[in-house]
Image (spheres, rainbow, N blue to C red):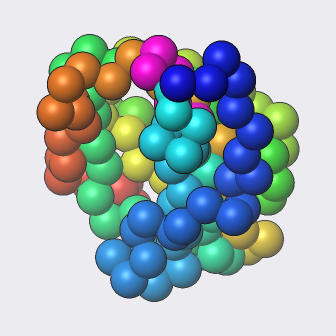
Amino acid sequence: MSRHAHVNLLEVEDSVKGRLEGLEGRFGRGPMGATDIGVSHWRYAPDVRSPMGHKHREQEEAYLVIRGSGQILLDGEVSELRQWDLVRVSPDVVRAFAAGPDGLEIVAVGGPKPEGGDGEVAPVDWPG
């Protein structure tokens, strides 16, 4: 395996295409050949709200808003997001996103992925 990699995330296949209208998700871990770090790009169309969330058994994640604004739901608590906000989330916290009127673009970074993965889909209840 190479000791370095160069990948353009916008050229990586949209892995979530068709799951939710207005949502794109591209995962860089595989194309980079990474073992200890995962980087993904998420693009939410204006006013798209995720109907489901997720959590992890082991992976801590950080989310960086690179464009737009919106909200993040963390264990039922809503926080506003704006460009360049950085949010760290412990593995067991259920999280979901909602885009504002200009959409929401996020880069997510996670640590080592346990064999077989550790992400779990979780229901969410957006207040209001």
How many marks the image carries: the answer is 0
Q: 22 and 116: which one is in front?
A: 116
Magenta residues (range): 35-39
**Eyeballing the image, is 96 above or below 1?**
below
* Quarter the C terminus occupies: bottom left
Q: Nearer the viewer, residue 26 or 4?
A: 4
Side (left or right) of 15 relative to 107: left
Q: Which residue is more in the foreground, 39 or 35?
A: 35
Q: Give the residue drawn at x 38%, y 39%.
A: 95
Q: Quadrant of residue 77?
A: top left
Q: Residue at x 24, y 21 (%)?
A: 114
Residue appearing at x 58%, y 37% in the figure: 32
User: Above or below — where is 124 with respect to 89?
Assistant: below
Location of residue 84 in the rendering, given as x and y in whole percent from the top left corner: 83, 36
Residue 37 among magenta residues: yes
Name the side, left or right, on which 49 lies relative to 125. Answer: right
By secondary structure, the bulk of the magenta-drawn segment is best described as: loop
Residue 90 falls in image quadrant: top left
